[in-house]
Image (cartoon, rainbow, N blue to C red):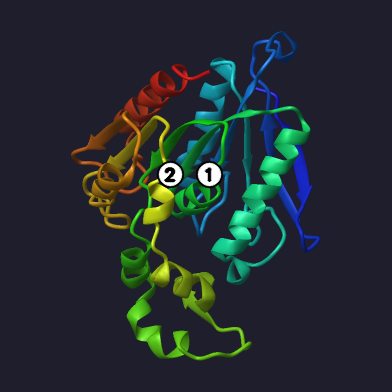
Amino acid sequence: MKQDAIEFTSNNGQILRGNYQKPYACAEDITDPTLMIFCHGFPGAHKDSHRRLFEQLQNICALAGIHSLRFDFRGCGKSDGDSGDFTLPQACEDMMQIYGWAMSQGYTRFMLSAEGLGSLPALMTLREGVRCLAFFWPVFDPRQYAIQHFQAENYRELFEKETEERHHVQIESTAVALSLIKELYQLDLTPFMNKVNMPALIQHGALDAQVPIENIDLARLHFRNRRIELTTYQNGAHGILPESQRKHLLFHYEQFVTKYV
């Protein structure tokens, strides 16, 4: 499968890097093509994460006649910036940059695939023309995620300080901005989830210790669409890595996206 390396210049001059893939079918024969945009989680990148999940999904899109783009947010993977600079507003700016490029190329119809924390910028920049959403172990309760992963309650005193000083914390080998933890801790995703009125697929492992499966309940509660397809894996952990489970994940994804081309 031939992919084109592609670069975008962000508002502050930093470069976003990714891979753009046209379908195997001749693109010129498609009068109103759909673009699938992949949103990776943090920390992470569009390549290699979760045993090359996005590469496998992009191949399915190519077979289904769907154009696709996977890229790294600033501070992640091959894009410019450090992990300590990653924030939600910046990730949303990156998403808007991608949409702007896509529309300049003539795309008016979109699909989104997001995993983990990548679900947040996907939802926060949701726009007209998005035909469907596919989520993998999505974070729909950012406050609980911040408490669980970053001990956010321990940073309350710093949250309350009005200062321009930049604070970072080290989570394992990744530098995380205190501003990101604060954003997650304070974010109410409900207004954004209430805007979901298109079909959605959610795949999640029941034994996921990083993103508890209870996040699915928030989708049931707040999504306004009539169709939510849920696939849970009884013995599945984060990333759905076992080969047998991954095959099911890819099968369900293919069945879902081909309905909305």
Could you say which is closer to the camera, residue 226 or residue 105? 226
Q: Residue 227's spot in the image, x, y percent?
A: 32, 28
Tell me residue 247's x, y (percent).
36, 26
Residue 18 in view of the camera: no
Check the image and report above or below for 228 versus 177. above
Task: Identify the residue position indicated by label 1 in the image.
Answer: 126
Q: Amino acid at mark 1?
A: Leu
Q: Is residue 196 above or below residue 105?
A: below
At horizontal 72% and vertical 60% (from top left) the residue drawn is 80
Crowd tier of the residue under label 1, counting other residues whose Cα lies within 10 Å: few below 14, some 14–19, many 20 or above = some
Look at the numbered discs 1 and 2 and tell me whether their residues touch, using CB distance below 8 Å. Answer: yes
What is the number of the mark on residue 195?
A: 2
Q: Is residue 171 left or right of residue 59?
A: left
Q: Which residue is drawn at the image coordinates 44% and 17% (left, top)?
A: 259
Amino acid type, mark 2: Lys
Closer to the eye: label 1 or 2: 2
Q: Nearer the viewer, residue 225 or 69?
A: 225
> Which residue is situated farthest in the top direction here?
29
Most foreground residue, 22 or 216: 216
- Considering only order in the chain, which callout, 2 or 1, is on the residue closer to the N terminus? 1
